[in-house]
């Protein structure tokens, strides 16, 4: 038999149940077409409540810290499924915040949360006065979050802090998906809780974990794009037959399947690597960087093909397609776009030298 | 509704990675001894009986097969590791690779006991070369248009017609050939073809070389004039060859040889761009490495699913489609990224040599073993569009 990560049969069954429960919850309360048809945001509260009650928002908080203690791999599965429904709630951000705070042993508030920094080159500092300074750009759902979990620098060390959002100055903005994406000024804000980051946690690791999270969401959204595009091509009739019977359309959909498959493999592998890793080492970096790059590429290609297959109706506000494609565009940019990760990965490969490339790739 | 596409994250077990070290040690030794040059990308220099015998002696050919036929009963993931290490080093595996990958498994599944115990052990010793007779003059991608006929004769069949683009036929001891035994039916144009095991030394078989545009000789025309094939050499059911390829196809399409054929270009690109590439070079390398990493994960995942007894046919086709396009595009991408490296820079000459060969062979990568267009048709069928 092959070597199947750390999965046992029991864990696989538990995973299947989690997948089923999560999928049903999103299907019942967060159907993308229902949301696209809805005038307001009345769908948000019931779905969020259901997610909280099921413990899904606290999946990455260990039980001793009042979390669900679901495990890293399960959390990534939840996020992949959320992506496949293009869920527009701060679920990923709340999971990430819970993970970050737990790393430092901090208690995690039971509410919607976000994290910072999110963008390349944004740095936060902890001043000698014990306050946070700095500005984080494009923080997703900042205005909807009760608290923001941050990584800041104190001298050469990293600290993790919980900051009350109400104390920060927000400049509201929106992402390419029209979701809250706010610039947050932390200047002079005293954190509600603060702890040194654990020994093996580097400042950049929030960015790493965030990249893997976005890759998982995008891989789910790409699966949904494929399913929806195939279904549409089979039902839409033009020139006297379903457009899915035309070879040109079939080949486009085959390409979309390839992009979706690559995204699934890359994001799934990164999630598995993180779940099985002791710390964020070079092997994990290769997995996360590759996932963010390759899934980001798939997002661009995949969204374009899905739109081409759907024609004009897919470009309309009433059709749910844009809920997926716009989020794919937006998620590409969070926690480092493809180019940023590619430059980092390329620099690492170059520094190690040509003959170290294959051994690095073939390590697992 | 077709089953969802799956690429479970599968890791190579410690035994497989230990085997990798062993294979690397062996290959380094052979390179040091001058057995082959890893910078050569062509197939003809890849035919090396001595190397194949050494691989066989180490148990690395037919390694997943039952021990009673000379196999080692090791896992598909261990075979994956051996294939991958040979391919990145451009090791000369031409003699045994076709038999190892696809002909051996056909025999295991369809041949009688006498043939299995005769031929399979010879394959595992690296002494037996196979070719695949599919394309014909006038029918390449459209396999089911094959016209080469096998007609009933005393104790067997007489074959007449010709196969073309047959890789390695001039070295092969045997061919697994697809011949017409009945006309297609109105309901099923794929009906009427049968797989045969053909001894290449039989009377009535002529192998004519066809030079390719890169100046090498790897493919051939094989002409059959009343060549006799005994009944015992029928592989599977008469007229039903179209039903026989399921998991074998997933193997054939999903291996690391489907994306590593030009990978030497990436290694030389990293070398020629140096330890501190500019932003453009770094980004370019990073994207290529991420893409290659992803292809490996996909291929390993398919092999893991095969090991678990699943039949990931759609997944295998996706790996070949993405993999061959990637290995084909790699030389052009590398050429762009190295464009501003001065001619006298260290590594430039070696890079240009490897690049030149890769550009020269790139066109065939998306044709051999099933074209991109055919694969996409298969993928479309798997998606429920056909």
Image (tube, coloured by chain):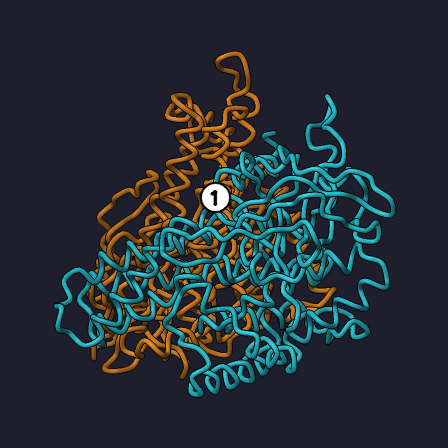
Which of the two residues, B261 or B127, is positioned nearer the viewer here? B127
Which chain does the cyan colour mark? B
On the rendered structure, is B188 left or right of A257? right
Count of marks, rendered view: 1
Which of the two residues, A122 or A124, is positioned nearer the viewer here? A122
| 10 Å crowding of disc 1: few (<14), some (14-19), many (20+) | many
Which of the two residues, A211 or A184, is positioned nearer the viewer here? A211
Residue A89: which quarter of the image? top left
Query: Residue at left 56%, top 21%?
Result: A235
Q: Residue A262, position in %: x, y?
A: 48, 52
Q: Residue A174, position in %: x, y?
A: 28, 42
Chain A's colour is: orange
Q: On the rendered image, what quadrant is the N terminus of chain A found in?
A: bottom right
Q: Residue B167, position in %: x, y?
A: 53, 55
Residue for badge 1: A221
Q: Secondary structure at mark 1?
A: helix
Query: Residue at left 15%, top 74%?
Result: B345
Above or below, A16 relative to B124: above
> From where the camera sits, is residue A274 visible?
no
On the rendered structure, is B25 left or right of B61? left
Give the chain of mark 1: A
Q: Residue B363, position in %: x, y?
A: 38, 49
């Amino acid at each position: 038999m092959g070597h199947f990560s750390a999965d046992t049969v029991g864990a696989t069954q538990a995973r299947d149940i989690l997948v089923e429960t999560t999928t049903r919850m999103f299907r019942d309360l967060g159907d993308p077409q229902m949301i696209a048809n809805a005038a307001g945001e009345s769908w948000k509260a019931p779905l969020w409540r259901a997610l909280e009650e099921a413990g899904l928002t606290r999946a990455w908080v260990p039980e001793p810290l009042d979390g669900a203690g679901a495990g890293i791999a399960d959390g990534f599965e939840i996020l992949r499924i959320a992506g496949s429904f293009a869920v527009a709630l701060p679920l990923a951000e709340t999971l990430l915040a819970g993970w970050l705070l737990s790393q430092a042993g901090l208690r995690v508030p039971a509410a919607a949360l976000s994290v910072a920094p999110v963008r390349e080159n944004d740095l936060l500092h902890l001043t000698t006065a014990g306050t946070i300074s700095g500005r984080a750009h494009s923080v997703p759902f900042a205005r909807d979050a009760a608290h923001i979990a941050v990584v800041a620098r104190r001298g050469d060390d990293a600290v993790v802090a919980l900051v009350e959002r109400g104390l920060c100055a927000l400049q509201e903005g929106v992402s390419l998906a029209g979701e809250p994406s706010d610039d947050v000024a932390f200047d002079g804000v005293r954190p509600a809780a603060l702890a040194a980051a654990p020994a093996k946690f580097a400042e950049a690791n929030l960015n790493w974990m965030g990249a893997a999270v976005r890759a998982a969401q995008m891989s789910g959204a790409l699966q949904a794009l494929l399913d929806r595009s195939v279904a549409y091509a089979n039902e839409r009739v033009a020139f006297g037959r379903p457009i899915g019977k035309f070879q040109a359309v079939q080949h486009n959909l085959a390409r979309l399947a390839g992009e979706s498959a690559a995204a699934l493999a890359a994001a799934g592998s990164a999630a598995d690597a993180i779940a099985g890793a002791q710390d964020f080492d070079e092997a994990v970096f290769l997995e996360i960087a590759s996932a963010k790059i390759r899934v980001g590429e798939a997002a661009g290609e995949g969204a374009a093909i899905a739109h081409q297959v759907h024609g004009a109706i897919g470009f309309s506000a009433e059709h749910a397609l844009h809920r997926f494609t716009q989020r794919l565009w937006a998620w590409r940019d969070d926690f480092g776009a493809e180019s940023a990760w590619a430059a980092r990965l390329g620099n690492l490969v170059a520094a190690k030298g040509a003959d170290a490339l294959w051994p690095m790739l073939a390590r697992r | 509704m077709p089953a969802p596409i799956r690429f479970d994250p599968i890791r190579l077990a410690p035994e497989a990675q230990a085997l990798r070290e062993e294979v690397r040690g062996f290959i380094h030794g052979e390179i040091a001894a001058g057995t082959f040059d890893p910078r050569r990308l062509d197939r003809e220099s890849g035919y090396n009986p001595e190397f194949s015998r050494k691989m066989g002696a180490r148990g690395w050919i037919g390694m997943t097969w039952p021990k009673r036929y000379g196999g080692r009963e090791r896992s598909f993931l261990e075979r994956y590791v051996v294939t991958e290490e040979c391919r990145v080093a451009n090791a000369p595996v031409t003699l045994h690779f076709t038999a190892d990958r696809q002909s051996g498994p056909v025999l295991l599944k369809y041949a009688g006991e006498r043939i299995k115990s005769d031929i399979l052990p010879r394959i595992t010793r690296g002494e037996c070369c196979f070719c695949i007779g599919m394309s014909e003059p006038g029918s390449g991608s459209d396999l089911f248009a094959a016209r080469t006929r096998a007609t009933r004769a005393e104790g067997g069949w007489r074959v007449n017609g010709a196969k073309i683009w047959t890789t390695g036929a001039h070295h092969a001891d045997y061919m697994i050939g697809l011949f017409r035994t009945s006309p297609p039916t109105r309901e099923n144009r794929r009906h009427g073809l049968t797989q045969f095991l053909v001894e290449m030394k039989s009377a009535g078989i002529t192998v004519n070389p066809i030079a390719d545009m890169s100046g090498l000789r790897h493919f051939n025309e094989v002409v059959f004039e009343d060549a006799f094939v005994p009944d015992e050499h029928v592989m599977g059911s008469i007229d039903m060859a179209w039903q026989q390829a399921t998991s074998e196809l997933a193997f054939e399409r999903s291996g690391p040889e489907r994306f590593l054929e030009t990978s030497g270009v990436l290694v030389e690109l990293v070398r020629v761009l140096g330890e501190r590439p500019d932003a453009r070079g770094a980004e370019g390398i990073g994207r290529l490495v991420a893409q290659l990493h992803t292809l490996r994960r996909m291929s390993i995942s398919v092999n893991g699913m095969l090991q678990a007894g699943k039949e990931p046919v759609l997944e295998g086709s996706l790996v070949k489609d993405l993999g061959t396009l990637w290995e084909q595009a790699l030389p052009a991408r590398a050429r762009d990224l190295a464009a501003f490296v001065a001619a006298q820079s260290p590594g430039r000459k070696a890079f240009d040599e490897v690049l030149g060969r890769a550009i020269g062979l790139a066109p065939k990568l998306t044709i051999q073993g099933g074209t991109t267009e055919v694969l996409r048709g298969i993928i479309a069928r798997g998606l429920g569009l056909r």
